[in-house]
Image: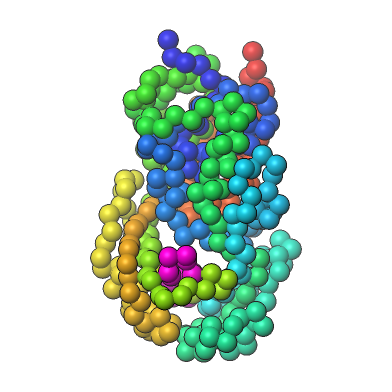
Amino acid sequence: MPTVYDVIVIGAGFAGAATAYHLSRLGAFRILILEREAEPGRHASGKNAALLRQAVNDPQVGAMVQETLRALESPPEDWERKNIFRCTGSVLLGENRVLSGFAGLLQKLGAAFELRGRHDFPENLDAEFREELRAADYEALLFTPGDGVVDVAALLANYLDAARSRGATLRCGAEVRGLSRETEAWRVSTGAGEFRARLVVNAAGAWAGGLGVAAGLPDRGFEHFRRHLFLAAPAAPKLDRPYLWDTAHEFYFRPDSQGLLLCAGDEEAHPAREPAVDPRVETRLFEKLRAYFPALASPEIRRAWACLRSFLPGSPFLIEAEVGAPGFLWVAGLGGHGMGSSFGAGRSAAERAAAFLNRQAP
């Protein structure tokens, strides 16, 4: 007979890990977390640029980012790893109209910011950075001092370890091969065995949509886009310098302990599978830097990788129960905000899960 749980969370990335973490705090639920890879964070949750950015396009996402930021600044007692956020600030370049929109949302959220015109630099920027910006192509500048860089591996481990400390079970190498609704429960078949639960949380990242279809649910129409990151190696990276994001020409970079991390802002539609590196994107990155940020015109690239960002058209993300399929909860389509919104998104999903379980309590 399959092992029985209250909840099966499919996916141990940020969406699933944060949901399991918060749910473990809301009650003595029997929680199983299934991860298809040999270890958590194998895909987008472990391959992202680790940027905590408060200036986003959606107020709901912005509020959830604020929850994550507060947790990073004042870590919960059940987090083993405390100092995992490097507050560097961020510099966003772009059109005044666009940055003014971001500034309006930041103001509503109560976040500190400075909106400046071209060559009107915040005092926090060092002289070298200012000279680099003088040669850049932009109309306005938005400085958000509370932004920074997160140790994503430590944050993911905090969620998972704290959940396990309260009894949750994590099984890696357990790809879901079958998912079906039985009487008042879901049966989940994996390479590691079969399991049953009153509630299934679909937090499978780029694979979430296909998993729903395989379970007989309507196709939600998720879209997946490949994005690349590049690691260059300058002589002495300045880790306290703000990261820079050009919102008009879509590229960004930040100092890293191993050099300089850069992104061309590429968005290419891609199937829900692990993406390979496209060498042409490096050429596009160089073209953007030469045209819009000459100070970094020819970085020496040492390494490149790619991951997928998943979106649900018309929605910032999908955190809701599936109508007509009792006990099926979506936590998917986070659109590149998985890490940044994780604390708030996980809390929201866990509250929905707990409400369902409490209503269905035997």
Name the residue at the top extreme: 1
> In this picture, which residue range is highlighted in magenta?
247-261
> Does residue 329 lie above or below 113 as drawn?
above
Q: Position of residue 80 (x, y in %)?
A: 62, 42
Name the residue at the left extreme: 279
> Does residue 115 lie above or below 196 as drawn?
below
Residue 32 appears left or right of 120: left
- Residue positioned 32% across, 63% down in the render: 303
- On-image quarter of the N terminus: top left
Is residue 152 visible to us here? yes
> Does residue 206 lie above or below 196 as drawn?
below
For the stretch drawn in magenta, the main secondary structure is strand
- Residue positioned 31% across, 45% down in the render: 273
- The number of numbered badges drawn on the structure is 0
Q: Looking at this view, is 254 or 334 the one in front?
A: 254
Name the residue at the front extreme: 235
Is residue 265 visible to us here? no
Residue 150 appears left or right of 351: left
Residue 81 appears left or right of 204: right
